[in-house]
Image: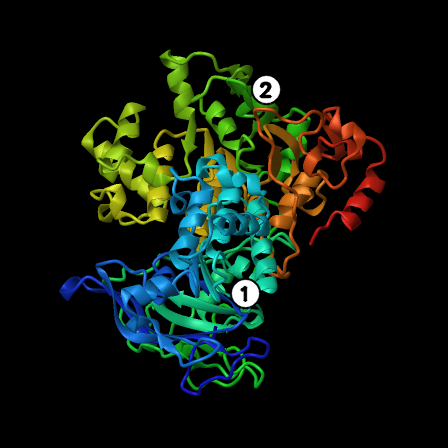
């Protein structure tokens, strides 16, 4: 997919002929003074066999563009101008915007289908999968026989790695990864030429994401369909797309070959997106990210919409709106275009006005608290909060099994693992929301027992929890002022109105929401996701805690907002000398911000150590799997699946090492005996039989044989 410029760039080599040609497409919501233009005069092309990526923050217009192409917009959204020309293999182009409803129903699914983000919302929860496949096939092939439907359903499920016997299941009986595979199989039912994928893996952990993306690329290679892949994760897109379109405030700001966007991003927004992702290779770099927040689409700034956030803005950027033009990077890349006044009349290469040159990033030292690890191991520093042989069972499910660790002042400790590994249960045990089945939690060395009285009140004040979904954790009926006033009064830190005002102003300043008067009278639904999460952090800080438990605190946010919040956590830990547990499935962000990493699998800690040691020298095969599955822009996803199955059912976990069924190095002993924690290096432990004898030879073998990519 390339932007159609005035010069009419030629198709890139290997992409084939034009399949979809979008010209001057604009989409608006509402009417009159409240009108909002969500997509503004977009020109793009998709070629046969191409994987196209559309990237941008929430509100950039990427999903609206896809829905407009598929004619799935609902009122008050309306297409106000443009054409969407579909080029069949034979015959004249057809404009999708002029199709009747009957023609659209025939076109969708047979020529163009969609895969959405939430498979649980896409699949009908009250119908078995086989019925849902039959509905699709009968709607488009009225004469199809029942035996043909059954055979096609089985074939489609096998195509995405699901056994045909699961066709009689309901959606809730499948794992998240299997549900998403089913939606892909449904999209392929009629062999369409175009599949639009709107954030298809955002709700999944990194291992499932990697597996599904590899399967998508395998299918695309075998079946030859074209893909429009929508995401806010540019690092992921670099791995799988042929061409990348970067959108901001409803417009395309840059488009080009993936290698060009990766190696030579021209627009400051593209560079900001690239600098918002932590990496697993090489040294830790200071992540610059993107300051500020996306603009209000109802009141866009004059000139370039990005100029209020741009580190390289010129005076004229606030008055002149740039057009999308070629950068002239080379004769081999005529399709690389950028919408930026920095390149107005400039020669080849980066313009001299850049204040933040590409590739100029500060190398960071060890994360805060890393230097104190030796003192902690020697017992010279006591943990603020400690889990001692902690276990939790729900009926027959043992969600957490014999877990021990400590959280120390001025240090971030990361707990990493797939969905269902027990991470959130650990957080709730530490927050005293669940009583442990076995073991104990100690605050300042004292066992936590009471669930009422002064000791309990002290515990809940000193140990604060920040949850994943800020909208669910903030009462929508109360204002921001109420949410912050209540803990200040409850814990006795503010009694008079003046003290409350002073406390709220200080909290809002700490989480960078200033001036406070712009926010405190609002309700949660009136704030962005990042702003809501900052309010949740401010509410936790109002109790003046010693420990902060953050359970996937940024997984629902855009990459730039995610980075700003993680930087906020890092600063708070340093300035307030907090102990923090950062729970995530993103091992790259754990490396970036945490001093220590603990890797959790099926309710058990399987590896722990200094973050750099765990990342650079992973000792457990599961840790290696997490690293291999994380987005890494220096490689390509072309069907090289890291296929290691899915986590076991905790109703009947396997004997021995719980990872052995997915482990490429499993031995007989792994199937029968639970491995003890083994010290593989200073301050580095792993529960793996591979390290029971010769550590050096095992490490050498795993480094050469264990890389699946």
Q: Is residue 600 left or right of residue 492?
A: right
Tally the marks.
2
Q: Please provide percent x and percent y for residue 662.
A: 68, 38
Q: Can residue 597 be seen in this view?
A: yes
Q: Residue at 45% of width from left, 49% of height from top? A: 133
Q: What element carries label 1?
A: loop
Q: Please provide percent x and percent y for residue 118.
A: 42, 47
Q: Please provide percent x and percent y for residue 199.
A: 45, 54
* Residue topped by disc 2: 388
Q: Which of 517 and 35 is in front in this view?
A: 35
Q: Nearer the viewer, residue 514 or 50?
A: 50
Contact, mark 1 vs mark 2 (Cβ under 8 Å)? no
Q: In this view, does 513 lie to the left or right of 662?
A: left
Res. 422 image quadrant: top right
Q: Which of 512 and 19 is in front in this view?
A: 19
Q: Please provide percent x and percent y for residue 139.
A: 38, 55
* Mark 1 to mark 2 CA distance (whole Å): 47 Å
Q: Is residue 243 above or below residue 165?
A: below
* Residue topped by disc 1: 241
Q: Residue at 26% of width from left, 58% of height from top? A: 74
Q: Is residue 39 left or right of residue 134?
A: left
Q: Is residue 431 left or right of residue 94?
A: right
Res. 368 image quadrant: top right
Res. 312 image quadrant: bottom left
| Residue count near mark 1 (Cα–Cα under 10 Å), binned few <14, some 14–19, many ≥20 | many
Q: Is mark 2 on a helix, strand or loop?
A: strand
């Amino acid at each position: 997919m390339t932007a159609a410029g005035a010069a009419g760039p030629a198709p890139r080599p290997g992409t084939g002929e034009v399949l979809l040609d979008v010209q001057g497409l604009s989409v608006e919501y509402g009417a009159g003074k409240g009108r909002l233009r969500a997509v503004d005069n977009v020109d793009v092309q998709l070629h046969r066999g191409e994987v196209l990526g559309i990237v941008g923050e929430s509100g950039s217009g990427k999903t609206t563009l896809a829905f407009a192409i598929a004619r799935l917009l609902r009122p008050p959204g309306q297409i106000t101008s443009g054409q969407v020309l579909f080029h069949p293999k034979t015959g004249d182009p057809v404009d999708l915007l002029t199709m009747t409803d009957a023609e659209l129903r025939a076109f969708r699914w047979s020529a163009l289908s969609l895969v959405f983000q939430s498979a649980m919302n896409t699949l009908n929860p009250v119908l078995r999968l086989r019925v849902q496949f039959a509905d699709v096939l009968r709607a488009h092939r009225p004469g199809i026989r029942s035996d043909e439907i059954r055979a096609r359903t089985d074939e489609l499920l096998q195509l995405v790695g699901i056994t045909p016997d699961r066709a009689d299941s309901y959606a809730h009986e499948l794992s998240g990864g299997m549900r998403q595979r089913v939606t892909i199989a449904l999209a392929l039912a009629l062999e369409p030429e175009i599949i639009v994928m709107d954030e298809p893996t955002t709700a999944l952990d990194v291992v499932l994401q990697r597996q599904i993306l590899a399967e998508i690329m395998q299918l695309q290679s075998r079946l030859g369909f074209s893909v429009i892949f929508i995401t806010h994760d540019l690092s992921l897109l670099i791995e799988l797309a042929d061409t990348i379109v970067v959108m901001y405030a409803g417009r395309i700001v840059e488009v080009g070959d993936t290698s060009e966007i990766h190696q030579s991003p021209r627009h400051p927004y593209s560079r900001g997106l690239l600098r918002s992702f932590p990496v697993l290779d090489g040294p830790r770099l200071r992540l610059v990210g993107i300051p500020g927040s996306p603009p209000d689409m109802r009141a866009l700034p004059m000139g370039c919409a990005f100029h209020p956030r741009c580190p390289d803005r010129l005076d004229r950027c606030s008055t002149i709106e740039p057009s999308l033009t070629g950068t002239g990077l080379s004769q081999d890349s005529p399709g690389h275009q950028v919408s930026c006044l920095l390149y107005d009349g400039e020669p080849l290469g980066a313009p001299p006005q850049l204040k933040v040159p590409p590739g100029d990033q500060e190398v960071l030292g060890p994360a805060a608290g890393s230097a104190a690890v030796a003192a902690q191991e020697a017992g010279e520093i006591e943990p603020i909060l400690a889990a001692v042989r902690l276990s939790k069972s729900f009926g027959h499910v043992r969600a957490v099994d014999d877990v021990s660790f400590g959280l120390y002042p001025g240090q971030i400790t990361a707990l990493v693992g797939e969905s269902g590994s027990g991470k959130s249960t650990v957080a709730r045990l530490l927050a005293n929301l669940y009583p442990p089945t076995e073991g104990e939690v100690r605050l300042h060395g004292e066992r936590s027992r009471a669930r009422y009285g002064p000791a309990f009140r002290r515990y809940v004040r000193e140990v604060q929890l920040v949850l994943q979904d800020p909208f669910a954790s903030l009462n929508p009926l109360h204002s921001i002022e109420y949410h912050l006033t209540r803990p200040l009064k409850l814990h006795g830190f503010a009694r008079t109105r003046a003290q409350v005002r002073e406390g709220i102003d200080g909290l809002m300043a700490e989480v960078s929401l200033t001036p406070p008067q712009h926010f405190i009278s609002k309700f949660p639904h009136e704030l962005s996701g990042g702003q809501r999460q900052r309010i949740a952090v401010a509410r936790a800080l109002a109790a003046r805690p010693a420990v902060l438990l953050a359970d996937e605190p940024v997984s629902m946010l855009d990459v730039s907002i995610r980075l700003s919040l993680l930087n906020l956590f890092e600063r708070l830990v340093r300035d307030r000398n907090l102990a923090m547990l950062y729970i995530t499935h993103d091992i790259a962000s754990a490396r970036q911000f945490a001093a220590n990493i603990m890797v959790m699998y099926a309710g058990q800690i399987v590896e722990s150590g200094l973050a750099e040691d765990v990342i650079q020298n992973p000792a457990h095969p599961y840790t290696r799997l997490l690293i291999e599955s994380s987005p890494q822009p220096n490689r390509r996803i072309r069907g090289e699946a890291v296929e290691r199955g899915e986590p076991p059912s905790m109703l009947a976990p396997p004997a021995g090492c719980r990872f052995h069924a997915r482990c490429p190095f499993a031995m007989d002993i792994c199937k029968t005996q639970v491995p003890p924690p083994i010290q593989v290096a200073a301050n580095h432990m792993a529960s793996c039989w591979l390290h029971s004898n010769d550590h050096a030879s095992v490490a050498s073998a795993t480094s050469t044989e264990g890389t699946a990519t």
